[in-house]
Image (cartoon, rainbow, N blue to C red):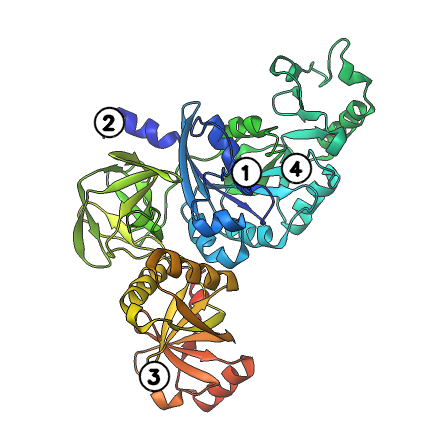
Amino acid sequence: MSINFKDDVMSRRTFAIISHPDAGKTTLTEKLLLFGGAIRDAGTVKAKKTGKFATSDWMEIEKQRGISVTSSVMQFDYDGFRVNILDTPGHQDFSEDTYRTLMAVDSAVMIIDSAKGIEEQTLKLFKVCRMRGIPIFTFMNKLDRQGKMPLELLAELEEVLGIESYPMNWPIGMGKEFLGIYDRFYNRIEQFRVDESDRFIPLNDDGEIDGDHPLKQSGLYDQTLEEVLLLNEAGNTFSPEKVAEGALTPVFFGSALTNFGVQTFLETYLQFAPPPKARNSTAGAIDPLSDQFSGFVFKIQANMNPAHRDRIAFVRICSGKFERGMMVNLPRLGKQLKLSQSTSFMAEERNTVDEAVSGDIIGLYDTGTYQIGDTLTTGKEDFQFDRLPQFTPELFVRVSAKNVMKQKSFYKGIQQLVQEGAIQLFKTVKTDEYLLGAVGQLQFEVFEHRMRNEYNAEVLMERLGSKIARWIEGDVVDENLSSSRSLLVRDRFDHFVFLFENDFAMRWFQEKNPDVKLYNPMDLHD
């Protein structure tokens, strides 16, 4: 390995942005890309008139609805760091994709709408980060609008999320009276909507502006000084160690839409966010600085380029160095593969990547070889990284091709979209009908839209409503146990699954058939 290898790995910062829909996630991503020089001008999500859409939203349905449905990956360089941002779907129906993406990052940025505070989806995603001990950085967004009092937002962070917080800066006013932020970390004030030359005002050793300055005439300045004094005396102390453990979140106030406070956030984040860390595997912890290349597939995406029917497996590199054309082991299949077609990402723009190191995310063109969760390694010792979470679907539909003549494209589309992991495919044991299972209704709508637009296959869907899915231990089961209230199906790996009408039906079945051992895959995760 070159001397530069260690420096390259230590310069990597790979994070996901988590938030509730509409908190400003895609907007913040755009502004970060702007600073990284990756794009020239930022588009907002719902750019109806200009026809400019956010860089990270590439799928047609996302452009129509103004929502992020799938996780994109974006990479840029800034100030000696190589930054990999994984944009995650904000919509709760796509939480499974988001959970898997969170397995591939080293830290998370949580965006909170200052008017709404902590919302349901943020809480769910936050819990996943806490479970994995991922360091979390908080950006309180939309300060240019009227919102909750900053102290109230801090209290909410600590009470609802149970995490200590340390405001790196503090807002001076908000909404129409938003004047800027008092930067505790850099000991300066950053003014809102002023010329670049007037943007920063240095503070003296007492944390105040020296001499005469128009800002000192504002009552909001005095109020901010009082609040900062309160934070200094009664607030938490800043601890990089606690940040690294995920026990303390640095809090930044700003406005992504007006691009205020974003650069300061990025520069401070890069100082305290962790480089790639060791990851658990069946062979113990794998050191990111190890010579042996390893990584895992956390996402598969079909048709990112509608002109070429392609599939891409997203791989998080966990150790060693990737070199295009290298041979790797795929332990699940017990075979070797040559990684000749690889790509790096800037949303729709893709470039062939020849080299990448621990912490980077690369895309491998896939002809159907990879599955989500696959480990790739080099060297003699085969090992596998920890399993990725598999969600238990709750909603089900019966699906068939509208046009019998289009069966071929129907089957091809179903197979490819199911391998992406957002929907799960089942087949009824007695009648061989196709059923789809998902965590949320929107996934079915996206499936239908993509089948029509990407595979030219119209589908018929019949709603079956919510069911309780339970897998069966062993591979033998009496097919006569299948009924309308406890439907026996097989998943795409040919494992038996019962779909129960409700809790009562499941309990009744268990009492009548104590020999049939049921389990929920979600319970297999610590």
- Residue 398, image x, y percentages: 42, 75
Q: Image check: 419 left or right of 17?
A: left
Q: Residue at x 69, y 47 (%)?
A: 116
Mark 1 or mark 4: name the one nearer the start of the chain: 1
Residue behind mark 1? 44
User: Does the rendering let one see residue 68?
Assistant: no
Mark 1 or mark 2: name the one nearer the start of the chain: 2
Q: Residues within 10 Å of mark 4 (few under 14, many from 20)?
A: many
Residue behind mark 2? 2
Mark 3 or mark 4: name the one nearer the start of the chain: 4
Q: Residue at x 59, y 29 (%)?
A: 259
Q: Residues within 10 Å of mark 2 (few under 14, many from 20)?
A: few
> Which one is closest to the eye, mark 3 or mark 1?
1
- Residue 3, image x, y percentages: 27, 25
Is residue 107 positioned above or below 185 on the image?
A: below
Mark 2 or mark 4: name the one nearer the start of the chain: 2
Q: Amino acid at mark 4?
A: Lys
Residue behind mark 3? 431
Mark 3 or mark 1: name the one nearer the start of the chain: 1
Q: Locate residue 519: give its quadrant.
A: bottom left
Classify mark 2: helix, strand or loop: loop
The dot on residue 142 is 4
* Label 1–label 4 contact, CB within 8 A: no
**Image quarter of the C terminus:** bottom left
Q: Amino acid at mark 3?
A: Thr
> Which one is closest to the eye, mark 1 or mark 2?
1
Mark-to-mark CA distance, 3 and 1: 48 Å
Mark 3 or mark 2: name the one nearer the start of the chain: 2
